[in-house]
Amino acid sequence: MKLIVGLGNPSEVYRHSRHNIGFLVIRHLSQVFKASLKKEKGIPALSAKCKTQGGNLILALPLTFMNLSGEAVRALVEKYKIDLDDLIVVCDDLDLAFGRLKVRAQGSSAGHGGVKSIIDSLGTKEFARLRIGIGRPKANQEAAEFVLGAFTKREKEELKEIIAKAGACCQVWIKEGITKTMNIFNSRSNENE
């Protein structure tokens, strides 16, 4: 059983914010796999169970706010006895150019509150993550304001393609594992810079 968790904030206010790009990827994958996201009993998350060519899969959106994402992830990992090699977290990244994907097998939170919460809750940094670049704020803009803000008109035009590419990345991970996924999606030819 594999688990893909998209990070974001559950309120409608944040639905189209940069910080919620992980949610957008999970919603895209739920359409790809024709699965309905429903409230997970006893766990603060929406989830969908799917059968894929790579085996059984759970898609999940924590219903906690971003900086408490670890509560939902730990509960899902424990309930479904998910091996940490079978977990990938999809999140936004301020340090990557808009639309660039970066896959990592493990590592620090890089200042991301949701990833930090998961590291703290699981007690390890050893889980995969797919980071999606949202670019940097302007010099006079606070980072928090930027990540919680909506995509620009230009960004919205590119977003569908970025979400589809992130979804394809997750599908490679499901079938082929982390090493092959990194080799494909971290290559220079896949950078949007």
Image (cartoon, rainbow, N blue to C red):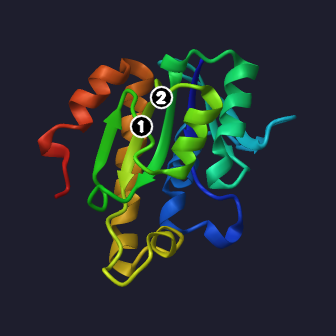
Q: Residue furthest right?
A: 42
Q: Going by the image, does 86 lie left or right of 60?
A: left
Image quarter of the N terminus: top right
Mark 2 touches mark 1? (CB < 8 Å): yes
Residue 78, percent from left and from top: 72, 21
Residue 146, percent from left and from top: 45, 73
- Report which quarter residue 188 is drawn in: top left
Image quarter of the C terminus: bottom left
The amino acid type, in three-letter code, at marker 2 is Lys
Query: Label 2, on which residue?
Result: 125
N-terminal of the two: label 2 or label 1?
1
Q: Secondary structure at mark 2?
A: loop
The amino acid type, in three-letter code, at marker 1 is Ser
Residue at 36 percent across and 74 percent down: it is 137
In the image, residue 11 above or below residue 113: below
Residue at 65 percent across and 32 percent down: it is 121
